[in-house]
Amino acid sequence: MTDGAPVIVVGMAPGQPEVTVRRALDLARGLGAEVVFAVVDLGEPPGREAGASGHDAHRVGPGVHVLAVHETLERLVGDRPVTWRVEPLAGDRVQELARLAERVDAVMIVVGTRQAGFRGRVSDFFGGSVAAQLAHHQPRPVLVVPTAPVGFEQATPWE
């Protein structure tokens, strides 16, 4: 946390639509908040920083690298007056996002919806959505940004 400003934690996932990042940045600017973008590596044991050993120091998740995430965020942040950073984590997404939010005393957690389709529905059926699990298992508000509203033919308000 910087200068006593509120903190917003944003859950990042591979291939995540940029709208989630843009909405979080707009919200942070309006609140005067710092943004902590959390990238969780599912392949590491819980509680261990991703890439903490040797040559994988910049790797977070299968095919996703902290440097690439950082470059994407730099492009999306552009000249917005928002303080932000990337936090690589490892383990269960829900637990790690909740732990990070607790550690930085976040005012909220922002996540995007999963992609529509069979794969997203199967994943939600077996594991539940990250947003739903966060809403039920930790005390902070969870903002869920719709990334591809189904049956909504008009442009979303932020487009």
Image (cartoon, helix red, strand yellow):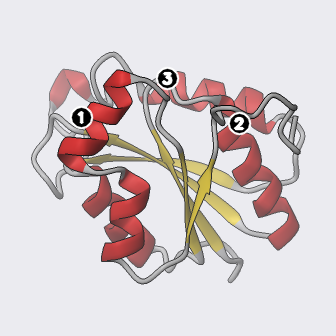
Whether residue 72 is visible to the viewer of this picture, yes or no, is yes
Mark 2 residue crowding within 10 angstroms, few (<14) / some (14–19) / many (20+) = some
Mark-to-mark CA distance, 1 and 3? 20 Å
Q: Earlier in the sequence, mark 1 or mark 3?
A: 3
What residue sits right under mark 2 in the picture? 19
Assign the N terminus to one quadrant of the image: bottom right
What residue sits right under mark 3 in the picture? 15
The answer to which quarter of the image holds residue 73 is: top right
Q: Where is residue 118 in the image (x, y as percent from the top left)?
A: 35, 23
Mark-to-mark CA distance, 3 and 2? 12 Å
Whether residue 103 is visible to the viewer of this picture, yes or no, is no
Image position of 39 with respect to 98: above or below? above
User: Which residue shows up at 28% across the image and 51% down it?
Assistant: 128
The secondary structure type at the circle numbered 1 is: loop
The secondary structure type at the circle numbered 3 is: loop
User: Which residue shows up at 36% across the image and 68% down it?
Assistant: 98
**Which three-letter amino acid code belongs to the residue tagged 1?**
Gly
Image position of 57 with respect to 20: above or below? above
Q: Nearer the viewer, residue 90 or 112?
A: 112
Mark 1 residue crowding within 10 angstroms, few (<14) / some (14–19) / many (20+) = many
User: Which residue shows up at 49% across the image and 25% down it?
Assistant: 67
Q: Which of marks 2 and 1 is nearer the N terminus?
A: 2
Residue extending furthest top?
63
Q: Position of residue 31 (x, y in %)?
A: 81, 72
**Which three-letter amino acid code belongs to the residue tagged 2?**
Val
What residue sits right under mark 1 in the picture? 51
Q: Which of 146 and 26 is in front in this view?
A: 146
